[in-house]
Amino acid sequence: MSPEELALFPFLTETSEYVEELDFSLDSLMTSIAFESVRRRGFERVMQAFDGEVSKPSFGNDKEVLSELLSYPYARILVSCVNEPAFTRRYALAEATAVHSIMKKRIEKDPEFVLDIGKDFGVSAVQSEEHIRIYFSDYIRYSLSMKDLSWKLINRHLEHGYVTIQREEFARLLQEAVRKRIEGSLPIPEIPDEIRNACDAQVTELKAKYEEQRQNLGDADLGEVDFSMFPPCINKALSNVREGVNLAHSMRFAMVSFLLNVGMQTDDVVNAFNVSPDFSEEKTRYQVEHIANNQYKTPSCATMQTYGNCVGKDNMCAKIRHPLSYYSALKFLAAKRQAEEEKYGKDEEKTANENNNLENNEPG
Amino acid sequence: MDELTKRFLKAKFQAHYKNLNLQLPPSFTSREWGFISFDPMPDVIMKRHKYFGSFNEVSEYLIGMAPAHVYYSVAYYDMPGAPRMDQKGWKGADLIFDLDADHLPGAKMTYSDMLDHVKAESLKLADFLTDDFGFSEDNIELVFSGGRGYHFHVYDDKISQLDSAERREIVNYISGRDLDFKFFFKEVAMVGDTGSGSKEFMGKRGKIPTKWVLEGYENGWGKRIAGYVVDYLKTEAEKGKDNPKEMFKDLKENKIAGDATLKKLAGFASDESLLSEITDKGRLDFPVKDFKGIIEYIIQKTVAEFGVDAGASVDEPVTGDIKRLIRFPGSLHGGSGFEVQTLKFDQLPDYNPLTNSLAFDDKPTKVRIQRPFSFLLNGQEFSVVEGKEELPEYAAVYLMCRGVANYGY
């Protein structure tokens, strides 16, 4: 690949080898005046993560190519210093989305080029007329995070280990590969203090912006426990417990860890079981505390399905992959609705007051 | 199980391991081994985290200890003998399917009915693994579990790195879960040379002629659907010849189509050349009312017919468990005395575990029966009641392993 192309695909093995051969010191990258534009572009990359996609430049000269090449490792340092898993994920997605836009176009004209990128991820795939045939394990690895039923292996054409897909779908799978690779390689471990100090101002700015967005999105805290927003599987388990039906061990575990994760206190969880005549508080408390102390995560929807604990799937279930996401999604929607209502309500109040003022003919 | 019985079984198992042509799994030195011994029974104590560096070590251990149950890990580790899972260093794992009658839904069956049922499921699975997934039979070890089912071990570098969620996606595929008919039965604009019939599809003429097709009819689930649709239509049309009322009974009962439609459908269903269009060209656009609903129904039936009841068990998400221990082929199952036997795929249809997996001969052996028990072994019905009994050795061992009898009198 040419340096221009490498600059567009900075996460490739070939690119990092190329950059390594250029042999710039990290020190100069962080501090030298000559690399001012690299740092500016690196910061821009990370800032663009807030918008969802990193922009891709067209190059006027070699210096711009070099800037673009080096801005990626610099951006990685920034993301590592911010060190917020949710933000790292967002950054990885923004980089991957940008590359997807390029690959989607490129694969129509030059499928071999995009297949070569796939090879860097160990993806076995070949062209087959207008389509691409990809080995099923590579397909699963990158399609699993896609929620649409059309991506499920069972809804695909699988023949002797190979799945036939559209070219653009291959580009989409590679986006996932890129996202996973970038996300998996961050944060960079043990960044020396001098490096941290050198980019401190930018990191502070990024952290502030991240915090601001996080507050707005309201994913900070789930707040009060709201039973009406539990997913069907957990509701079913709760009603089973109330009716004295014995839960399978795996379901009991899922329910307890769910209740603890949404913020219920150990005592309340234990009490939830206090309905049957043979209720043993000591035993239940021991089990609940064991789960609480180990901070076990609630099993995902996939695991729930595997154990036969996924029941009463509804529309929201189709959109999520984890019982806790069901809860947080409904919480989020409710909070949003409430915020809107408050706003609307205030406006009405204001109008009402204004009317009052008019009627009473009193000066405000 | 009394002391004498334990000693007897241990000696019998020992003899088995002395004569065994030991076949070790690939990379056996990277696997964890686990054993359950006769000695502490009825307590079941698993000795885990063992590892062996050589063929002879395995052989000597088996002969020396004569364990009741022998397992090895489906996973390979850097340090298989490390006492804690997080210290072992997971390197990869075989892809495993455990089809066990214990897991299968349905009414109570006899032991041999259960074994037949699991065998049918295993044959379906074998087809998925070789046809759809393209694994070579050389890389698949099919094993009778010594209990109520069969294990499939897939040894292939390409799948050893799959994580649990990825493995579950394979289970979904073979079980038919989440199959959505709209990805298979599609309306497409007419191209190529497959005729012009669909111009008059449901009596309408559009600007662009379209036809309904079975996408992917040449392989995988698409092929199964195509084949099933044809079989279904043929069978139903056949029924109609004798008694029109019997024809498409389920479609009628489920209110999927009315009498007039079904009568029309029956006409097409007896047309061989139309039917072969389905399997040969994937063309499936009979001009009858509600045809989409009919096909959707038949596709659901296909899933029920071909989907493997695998891993959907409540207790054991086997395939997704990438650190599981599985029975060592060639070993004896301490709960039955049967040999955990490796089979070739073509042996499976005629394989009868209740005859073929017997590891002991018919030397008369004296036992004391604890409770009434009926069973079928080696083609022979046995029915025993409390008291002294002389039985062929394989039957005596079976009852002792099952905890129904003690040795000697």
Image: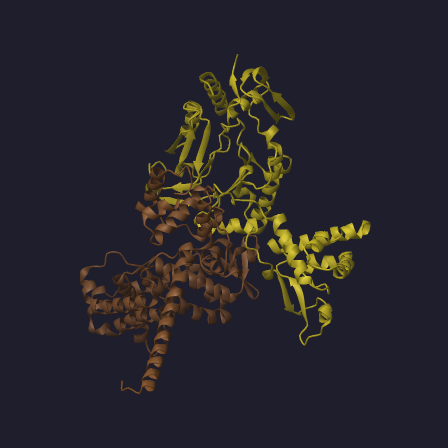
Which residue, as the protein is rendered here, is positioned at the far front? A360
Image x and y of residue A304, in percent: 46, 49
Considering depth in this image, is A9 or A193 the residue closer to the camera? A193
Image x and y of residue B210, in percent: 67, 70
| Colour seen for chain A | brown
Which residue, as the protein is rendered here, is positioned at the far right? B242
Q: Is residue A351 at least partly visible in the picture? A: yes
Considering depth in this image, is B144 or B46 the residue closer to the camera? B46
- The number of numbered discs placed on residues in the rendered structure image is 0
Is residue B358 positioned above or below A352 on the image? above
Image x and y of residue B142, in percent: 55, 39
Q: How is the image coloured?
A: by chain
Which residue, as the protein is rendered here, is positioned at the far top? B409
Considering depth in this image, is B378 or B112 the residue closer to the camera? B112
Q: Is residue B131 left or right of residue A28?
A: right
Image x and y of residue A165, in percent: 54, 62
Is residue B163 positioned above or below B77 on the image? below
Is residue B355 positioned above or below A49 on the image? above
Considering depth in this image, is A176 or A223 the residue closer to the camera? A223
Q: Is residue A4 at least partly visible in the picture? A: no
Chain letter, yellow in picture? B
Location of residue A38 by image quarter: bottom left
Q: Is residue A172 left or right of residue A57?
A: right
